[in-house]
Amino acid sequence: MLFDGAVLAVVIALIAGGRFPRLAQLGLRWPWVFVAAFGIRFCIIVLGVRGWQPVLVAAPALHILSYLLLLAALAANWRLWPLCIAAAGVLMNFAVIAANGGAMPADAALVRAAGQGRLIELVRGGNYPTHVLLDAHTRLPLLADRFLLSYPYPRPSVFSVGDIFITIGVMLLIIYGMGAFGWRRKEAPVASAQRASEV
């Protein structure tokens, strides 16, 4: 969902006059922390599927750590208003993950409807440690993966309320960062004045 939203945002931004070089002018802080957070989650999934026992044991703590890193990086970039929207989504996902032992609950029926039956087997076997199946004991179930983006959408998926906020925030960041729809054009004179005063 996030990847598809990012691609769509790039297309919209280019049509609306956005340019890729403007993204470099955003001044994103702590980019390596974002990379580390997603890298940890990627390793948990890849190594967990392969049955690496140390990773499976440490997965709940590592999953929570990845979200803490992500929240710290988002806090460091609070001045970029689209990331405040994304941060709200990350906080929602973090809350439900922390409340359920370090794993995101997912509705098994919807996961199956999305054509991801194999994922259910991995979760039940303990080899997909970032997720658990939604049941009567799930805490904060309204924040779990319980919504379906179904066919005819080419990439059906199950997502949470938090994922919606994250996707919208990232899309707006890309569109804003690329300067589409005239965004950020008013910032140029201010930046020029600041550089002139420094000289």
Image (spheres, grey):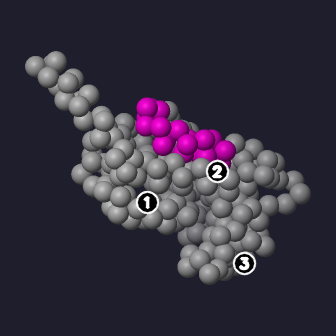
Q: Is residue 86 magenta?
A: yes
Q: Nearer the viewer, residue 129 or 181?
A: 181
Q: Is residue 175 left or right of residue 107?
A: left
Give the answer, above or below, for where 27 lies relative to 136: above
Answer few, some or many: residues within 10 Å of disc 1's Cα (few below 14, many 20 plus, some between 14 and 19).
many
Q: Secondary structure at mark 1?
A: helix
> In the rendered image, which quarter is residue 99 located in?
top right
Q: Residue at x 62, y 81 (%)?
A: 152
Q: Is residue 150 left or right of residue 195?
A: right
Q: Is residue 59 magenta?
A: no
Where residue 168 appears, x then y in whole percent? 54, 52
Where residue 188 appears, x then y in whole percent? 25, 35
Residue annotated with mark 1 = 9
Answer few, some or many: residues within 10 Å of disc 2's Cα (few below 14, many 20 plus, some between 14 and 19).
many
Who comes first in sequence, dot 2 or dot 3?
3
Residue annotated with mark 2 = 162
> In the rendered image, which quarter is residue 115 located in?
bottom right
Q: Residue at x 36, y 44 (%)?
A: 183
Give the CA distance from mark 1 to mark 3.
27 Å
Q: Secondary structure at mark 3?
A: helix
Residue annotated with mark 3 = 113
